[in-house]
């Protein structure tokens, strides 16, 4: 389980394909604190650490993960939002995030609001957002504004813009999207 509070940016150093799987080698400041078999969220996608070498560690994405996330679009040098799993006696600063990406969304607009930024996204699924509810964009816990059918916006403060990969996001880019777990359960109950 995660909170959506990004700890830092990792850099993709190498990409190795093995059958349908892809092994990503990531350089991160906190690698020395990781251990084999630990879960780390990468742009909101929970992956298992399988190898550690100095400042770099390796995670493996299977075909299912590659088809449902933006990981298949990564290249060497890609900046990735990173978060280690939540410590159960810590504060829940963001919201409950599973690290299970529901779908990808496309960035449709970026508006500079004189010190902050408003990002708009569209997606193709039956999931919903609600005004002032929570959503996870590339692993970042955010508050929904302008909620609409198959789309929403979020506002980003300068700190979040600078310390996550939002600063490199462009119109047309695909992001990983995880909808609020409580909202997903409520929606499922209403559909019964």
Image: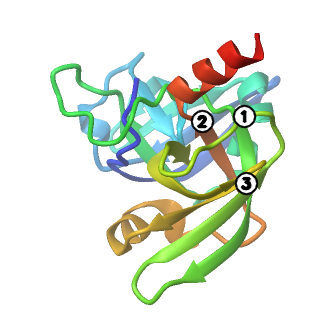
**176 is higher (above) or lower (below) than 117:** above
Residue on which the image places disc 1: 127
Q: Position of residue 62 (x, y in %)?
A: 72, 23
Q: Position of residue 86 (x, y in %)?
A: 30, 27
Work out which quarter of the rendered image holds the C terminus and state it.
Answer: top right
SS class of the residue under badge 3? strand
Residue 179 has which mark? Answer: 2
Specify whether 178 is left or right of 57. Answer: right
Residue on which the image places disc 3: 151
SS class of the residue under badge 1? loop
Whether residue 22 is visible to the viewer of this picture, yes or no, is yes
Specify whether 16 is left or right of 164. Answer: right
Q: How are the colours assigned in the image? A: rainbow
Judge the density around disc 3: few (<14), some (14-19), many (≥20) Cα neighbours within 10 Å: many
Alpha carbons under labels 2 and 3: distance apart: 12 Å
| Residue at x 30% of width, y 29% of height | 34
Residue 79 has which mark? Answer: none
Alpha carbons under labels 2 and 1: distance apart: 7 Å
Closest to the observer: 33 or 5?
A: 5
Q: Residue furthest left?
A: 89
Closest to the observer: 67 or 179?
A: 179
Whether residue 75 is visible to the viewer of this picture, yes or no, is no
């Amino acid at each position: 389980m995660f909170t959506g509070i990004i700890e830092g940016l990792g850099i993709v150093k190498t990409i190795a394909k093995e059958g349908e799987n892809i092994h990503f080698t990531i350089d991160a400041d906190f690698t020395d604190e990781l251990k084999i078999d630990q879960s780390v969220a990468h742009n909101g996608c929970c992956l298992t650490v399988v190898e550690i070498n100095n400042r770099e560690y390796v995670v493996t994405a299977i075909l299912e993960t590659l088809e449902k996330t933006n990981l298949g679009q990564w290249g060497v040098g890609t900046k990735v939002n990173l978060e280690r799993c939540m410590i159960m006696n810590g504060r829940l600063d963001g919201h409950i995030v599973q690290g299970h990406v529901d779908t990808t969304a496309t960035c449709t607009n970026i508006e500079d609001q004189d010190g902050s930024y408003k990002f708009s996204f569209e997606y193709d699924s039956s999931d919903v957002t609600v005004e002032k509810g929570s959503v996870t964009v590339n692993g970042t816990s955010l508050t929904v504004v302008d909620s609409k059918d198959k789309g929403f916006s979020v506002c980003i403060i300068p700190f979040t813009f600078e310390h996550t990969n939002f600063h490199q996001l462009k119109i047309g880019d695909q992001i990983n999207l995880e909808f609020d777990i409580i909202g997903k359960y409520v929606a499922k109950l209403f559909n019964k």
